Image: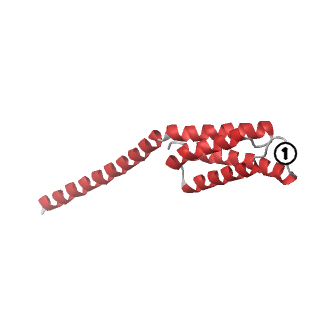
């Protein structure tokens, strides 16, 4: 009887060690994946920062801004959530729509949309930083 209880206790302890190890391995794997993707995350964030700088500096959308947002799209596909990627794609389409030749006058709503694009880029950068943070 005592042998059976000891055997069950040892099996229970082994099971606890196994479950604990599995949890640690899963957490380590998730952390390693985040570290491996850090370069892609940083690249996408830097492209968006560049676009945000151009939007706030000039007050209008030029080809460099569209290019920067487009360049942020590729690494984002690899490392960010679907919702964030969709919002980034919307920002790209918005910037593309707002791109006017330099001599062409801007409508009032375009100026408001450019300010909104800047705020959207700020929000996207903050969300990217949040997703990129290591636990």
Q: Which residue is mark 1?
A: 104
Which residue occupies 24% across, 53% down?
Answer: 14
- Counting every numbered tag in the picture gives 1
Instruction: Judge left or right: residue 47 versus residue 96.
Output: left
**Quarter of the figure with the N terminus:** bottom left
In this view, 52 is above or below 92: above
Residue 105 in percent (x, y) is at 87, 46
Residue 21 in percent (x, y) is at 32, 49
Which residue occupies 43% across, 44% down?
Answer: 33
Residue 54 in percent (x, y) is at 73, 37
Instruction: Judge left or right: residue 6 versus residue 111.
Output: left
Taking depth in this image into account, of 36 and 28 the one nearest to the observer is 36
Answer with the quarter of the image where residue 61 lies.
Answer: top right
In this view, 127 is above or below 50: below
How is the structure coloured here?
secondary structure
Badge 1: residue crowd in 10 Å (few <14, some 14–19, many ≥20): few
Instruction: Judge left or right: residue 119 versus residue 112.
Output: left
Which residue occupies 51% across, 42% down?
Answer: 134
Residue at disc 1, secondary structure: loop
Residue reaching furthest to the bottom: 1
Taking depth in this image into account, of 36 and 112 the one nearest to the observer is 112
Residue 114 in percent (x, y) is at 78, 48
Taking depth in this image into account, of 4 and 69 the one nearest to the observer is 69
């Amino acid at each position: 009887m005592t042998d059976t209880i000891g055997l069950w206790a040892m099996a229970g302890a082994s099971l606890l060690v196994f479950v604990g190890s599995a949890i640690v391995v899963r957490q380590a794997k998730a952390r390693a994946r985040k570290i491996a993707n850090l370069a892609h995350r940083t690249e996408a964030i830097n492209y968006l920062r560049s676009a945000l700088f151009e939007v706030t500096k000039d007050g209008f959308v030029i080809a460099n801004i569209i290019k920067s947002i487009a360049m942020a799209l590729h690494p984002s596909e690899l490392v960010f959530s679907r919702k964030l990627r969709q919002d980034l794609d919307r920002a790209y389409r918005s910037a593309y729509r707002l791109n006017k030749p330099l001599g062409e006058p801007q409508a009032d709503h375009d100026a408001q949309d450019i300010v909104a694009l800047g705020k959207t880029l700020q929000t996207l950068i903050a969300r990217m930083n949040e997703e990129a943070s290591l636990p």
